[in-house]
Amino acid sequence: MSTADDPPPLAGWIDLSGRAKFRLTGPDRVRYLNGQVTRNMARLQPGEAVPALVCNAKGRLEAEVVVRAEADALLVDAPGALRDSLLARLEKYLIADDCAWEDVTEDFSLWHGPADRGTGTVSRFGPPGTDLWQPAGTAGPAGPRLDPAAVDLLRLAWGVPAWGAELTADTLPQEARLEDRAVDFHKGCYVGQEVVSRLRSVGRVNRLLCRLEADGRQPLVAGDRLFLAPAVPGGEPAEVGVVTSARPDPRRGVILALGYLKRAALTPEATFQAGPGKNALSTVVKCRETTASSD
């Protein structure tokens, strides 16, 4: 039986037509893309889709993408803001491979909805869903639609990072806890693999993305810094993190948020003060993570 604290299901269709969309064709498409993303393209069957990451040689993110296999092509969608830079990045490594990229952003609409329709599922915002690619101008699917505010609240409840908020060109996959949902550590080489794999085997990141919750009596917004209360009365609060996204949840009467916290601050009993500075702290924030065991 679900409770009010459980993340909500995917209860409608989400319009993702603003995402950049590319088609990769040619006999070498699987081998080539396998060398560019963090998931194993050789295992992807027609109709299946998986989230993946594009990294630079230092293991930091260049894009978060979803790859879908068709019988004769691979479809890749990414944040719309990355349309030009990502295509240039992907074409940069396309040298002797017998395949070609095509920008099909304007040719298709893209919807994501409940997983009981269509073929294959992919988790974009937390709960499993299905993607529907349609020719541009086609009427969208029947059923309820989720507006941007509802989509944002859905991903915050499930702890899913978004490009431009939690994910930037400075982010390592393990910092954003993406290794379980978007990285295959048993596949062949890809750009950035050495760093990503080393962090898992012999190192660990110093900060982690966490699901946060505040009681809603004071505002909480992206950019608010997070502090630990001083260990002794009169001491200085220690800055340990920052809020990256926040939104009130009317269902529960709280503010849901995501933010990065220093690993050392992640203890089961820790609570934080959020504010623009240590002398002007506002609301109390609790971390919904109970462990720092993510490498």
Image (spheres, rainbow, N blue to C red):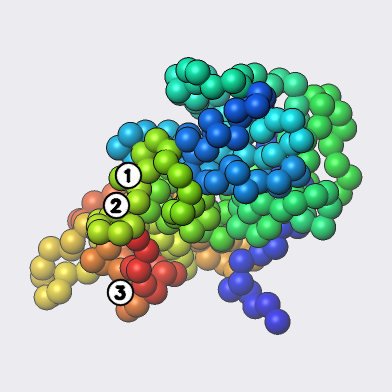
Tell me the SS state at disc 2: helix
* Three-letter residue code for mark 3: Thr
Left or right, 275 with respect to 162, comes to left
Residue for badge 3: 267
Quarter residue 33 falls in: top right
Of the two numbered discs 3 and 1 on the same chain, state the one appearing first in sequence: 1
Q: Please give the label number shown on residue 194.
A: 1
Q: Position of residue 114 (x, y in %)?
A: 77, 55
Taking the spot 59% from the left edge, 20% from the top edge, the residue there is 98
Identify the residue under disc 2: 198
Q: How far from the left and from the top, in percent, is residue 271?
A: 33, 71
Frontmost residue, 242 versus 290: 290
In the rendered structure, are the residues bearing label 1 and label 2 in contact, judged by CB atoms less than 8 Å apart?
Answer: yes
Amino acid on which disc 1 is placed: Glu
Q: Position of residue 44 (x, y in %)?
A: 65, 46
Q: CA distance from mark 3 to mark 1?
A: 30 Å
Q: Residues within 10 Å of mark 3 (few under 14, many from 20)?
A: few
* Mark 1: few/some/many CA within 10 Å (<14, 14-19, 20+): few
Question: Which secondary structure lies at badge 1?
Answer: helix
